[in-house]
Image: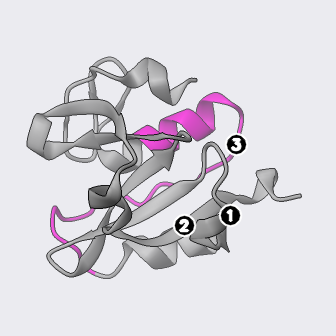
Amino acid sequence: EIARSYVGTRFHHEGRAPGVGLGCAGVAICAARAVGLMVRDGVPYPRRANGALVPLIADQMQPIAIADLQLADVLVMTFDNQPHHVALYAGATIIHAYLQVKKTVEQPYIDYWRGKVVGAYRFREFVA
């Protein structure tokens, strides 16, 4: 629900200011911190993948099977054959700051997005 409150916030690369400007990682980081999770940030980072995203996430989160997704899990997505986008799983939808629409959005988790997912992670505090 916290991430959902960010919908409409303009896209800003590396943004970490809900209501002002968010990047894709900013949505996940700000939502996690808002519920009290201690999440290390990895800024600055380039707009194009440099290989740092997955190790940073994997160091702090539990990898999970995509078939086992639960609300608030983090999806790592690939564009241009490199993982460099994240979204929060919200059931039938995903929540992410999306450059192409220039804002944070909630969109249906359709085959297009499923096809981009290359990994899924859960905050360790949420692992049973």
Q: Residue furthest front?
A: 111
Residue 128 vertical position relative to residue 21 in the rendered view, above or below? below
Amino acid under disc 1: Asp
- Per the model, the C-alpha gap separating discs 2 and 1 is 9 Å
Query: Which residue is at the front of the view, 128 or 61?
Result: 128
Please indicate, yes or no, whether residue 33 appears anywhere in the rendered image: yes
- Within the magenta stretch, is there residue 37? yes
Residue 120 numbered tag: 2
Tell us which disc is closer to us: 2 or 1: 1
Q: Position of residue 22 (x, y in %)?
A: 30, 35
Q: Quadrant of the C terminus?
A: bottom right
> Does the CB distance between marks 2 and 1 fall below 8 Å?
yes
Query: Which residue is at the front of the view, 17 or 82?
Result: 82
Query: Which residue is at the front of the view, 96 or 44?
Result: 96
- The mark nearer the N terminus, 2 or 3, is 3
Please indicate, yes or no, whether residue 61 appears anywhere in the rendered image: no
- The residue segment tinted magenta is 27-50
